[in-house]
Amino acid sequence: MTTEEVRALSDEALFERIAAWSMATFPAGTPASHAKHLAREVEELAANPTDELEWADVAILAIGAVARSGGSLMRAIERKHEINLTRQWGQPDADGVVEHVRAAQHQEEMNDAE
């Protein structure tokens, strides 16, 4: 087994431990309640975007929410990353945010290039 494979297994195990802790600690939690809590944490993160622990709060809430939906955030991240690898990406906006080009926008850009 490669180092990368071992790391992936340990990452998945960590996500599973966090999900189990979330379910046990917050038994009345729902994906919707986690999403609302997540919105609050994102505000804290926006106020201090270099704070690793704020990023961790966001990740922990996301892990718990996806687990309550019957999924795995690790697997969802893997799937979404594969999708992102195939996308076209636009230019940064005034805030430095880069989003993927929507299909209609991409077609319009292709037409403009012709």
Image (cartoon, rainbow, N blue to C red):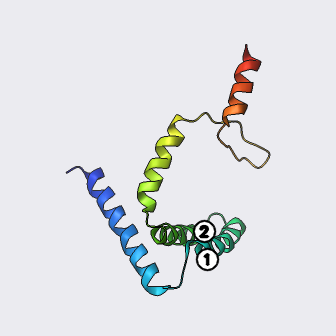
State the separation of the CA atoms marked 2 and 1: 24 Å
User: Horizontal placement of 15 versus 57: left or right?
Assistant: left
> Height in image: 100 above or below 37?
above
Which numbered circle lies on residue 55? none
Q: Please tell me how crowded label 1 is: few (under 14), some (14-19), or many (20+) other residues with Cα within 10 Å.
A: few
Q: What residue is at 42 percent from the left and 85 percent from the top? A: 24
Find residue 32 and report its horizontal and vertical position in percent. 61, 72
**Nearer to the camera, 53 or 88:** 88
**Nearer to the camera, 63 or 44:** 63
SS for callout 1: helix
Q: Count how many numbered circles sit on residues in the image.
A: 2
Q: Are marks 2 and 1 in contact (CB under 8 Å)?
A: no
| Amino acid under disc 2 | Asp
Q: What residue is at 33 percent from the left and 56 percent from the top? A: 8
Q: What residue is at 37 percent from the left and 74 percent from the top? A: 17
Q: What residue is at 55 percent from the left and 76 percent from the top? A: 30
- Dot 2 or dot 1: first in sequence order is 1
Find residue 59 and report its horizontal and vertical position in percent. 52, 67
Find residue 94 and report its horizontal and vertical position in percent. 80, 45
Which numbered circle lies on residue 33? 1
User: Horizontal placement of 49 versus 1: left or right?
Assistant: right
> Height in image: 32 above or below 92?
below
Circle 2 or circle 1, nearest the eye: 1
Q: Please tell me how crowded label 2 is: few (under 14), some (14-19), or many (20+) other residues with Cα within 10 Å.
A: few
| Amino acid under disc 1 | Ser
Quadrant of residue 13 in the image? bottom left
SS for callout 2: loop
Quadrant of residue 98 in the image? top right
Question: Outermost residue, right direction?
Answer: 94
Question: Outermost residue, left direction?
Answer: 1
Which numbered circle lies on residue 51? 2
